[in-house]
Amino acid sequence: MVELLSESVLRLVYLVSAVFFIQGLRDMTHPRTAVRGNLLSSLGMLTAVGVTVLWFDVISPAVLIGGLVVGSLIGAGLAVKVEMTQMPQLVGVFNGFGGGASALVAGAELVEYRIEIGGAFPLEMGIAAAASGIIGAVTLFGSMVAAGKLHGVVTGSAIRYTGEQAVKAVLLATAVLSGVYLVVQPDVLSTALQGTWVPSYWLLVLAASVLGVMLVIPIGGADMPVVIALLNAYSGLAAAGTGFVLNNSALIIAGTLVGAAGMILTVIMCESMNRSLANVLFGGFGEEASSEEMEDIYEGNITETSPEELEMLLDTADRVVIVPGYGMAVAQAQHAVAELGQLLDGDGVDVEFGIHPVAGRMPGHMNVLLAEADVPYDKMKELEEINPTFSQTDVVIVTGANDVVNPRANEDDSSPISGMPVLNVNEAGTVIVNKRSLSPGFSGIPNPLFAEDNTYMLFGDGKEMMQNVVNEYKESN
């Protein structure tokens, strides 16, 4: 009776944790409630981990406390030290750690089963372990490459080579066949290393690890936001698989929620770029444009401006839209941009911020930066809401954005971004583009917007230029 009651309590706590997870995900769908969602999700995971450790007596209290202290110190250090511009690659690393942990735990459970029980693995255990090993290893090494591309230690260009699809197919086949072997013939060679080694599982993990690298290397930097979302889904699926191996309902629920949320986000991101997932994974998007192509578009057609001239334009404007991009994040210009918006708003100018779904290097990147600078949530408008208003806008200030405002998406069927929904800023009366140079965005193609008659280039560091505009506006008003 005591054991039955205790198990009932365990399952009840797992159910409560699942409720926290679900409500946390729900709250994270809006910037206003995102912080609460993170706290609820963290509380749910803390509850699930705590009760699992207490119930199963997994490791000694000293080792547990030591692990918690070390992990907490590392996590707190990263949270304090890592800049907002580096958050996407940190998310990628976390995805990788989650996948790697799932693969290792599933393998450890197989080893423990072989030592304590011996004989054939249960069918469902073998299948779940194989799935967790493949997905987890792909997630770990794919995430490391993605994080490297985002951080600049791995080239952001698409690395292509002859026969790459055949290499991926061989690696995938090796991993899958090793998984099948694990399920249908687990006893063969099981005496190696005194029966503690499960050779087919580790071959599976090795093949999947190399596959993870090969899958992400050919993908260009422009698609990294989609890749991060997809790898997030993978990490959840790997965790769910490990939950089946351990027969742990909390892990199954948490992994399934993460996997489903990641896949939904991946689909949304692909639709925002008018790309199929297959095209993202195998298309090689992000190859560099030739210098000749850039000269044909820009030569003699670029008009520069200054903070002083921009201030004079703003003095006569009734409506202004600010479009942020990754360049704003790099320059840490969000506070200057937000201050400019506040000054204009205080003088009766209608000010809004146009946010593209894939601006920056991860979903919601621009929203987080602007919220950090105290931009009101109701001033941040999504693409579908802001696009119809550009024709009634006097001045658009594009700060650090490139591909998401490129009109070639609507005009050039041969362009790599053809059909991608973009912010139609060229429809405004005047467009000011603040960039360091005319270098292409992640897609690797030039932007004809920079050469249009109503566009003026404000070259320079985003933070410095926007702060200069703020200072000029204050002096004249």
Image (tube, rainbow, N blue to C red):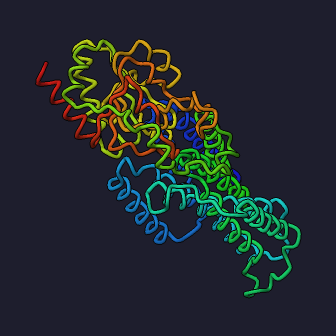
Q: Residue at x 43, y 26 (%)?
A: 354
Instruction: Look at the picture and state if 182 lies above or below 11.
Output: below
Residue name at image x 85 percent, y 62 percent:
123
Q: Nearer the viewer, residue 314 or 457?
A: 457
Q: Is residue 142 positioned above or below 453 on the image?
A: below
Residue at (37% x, 27% y) in the render = 455
x, y percent for residue 148 = 49, 60
Q: Residue furthest left?
A: 475
Q: Is residue 50 visible?
A: no
> Depth check: 435 or 340 in front?
435
- Specify whether 212 is left or right of 124: left
Q: Is residue 145 left or right of residue 331?
A: right
256 relative to 301, above or below? below
Q: Measuring from the top left, give residue 292's x and y in whole percent.
A: 48, 47
Residue 348: image quadrant is top left
In this view, the residue in front, 322 or 263, is 322
Would residue 192 be found to the left or right of residue 299 on screen? right
Image spot of residue 320 (x, y percent): 33, 19
Question: Can the viewer see residue 428 in this picture?
Answer: yes
Pick the quarter of the image with the C terminus: top left
Give percent across and percent down for residue 344: 25, 19
Q: Quadrant of residue 214?
A: bottom right
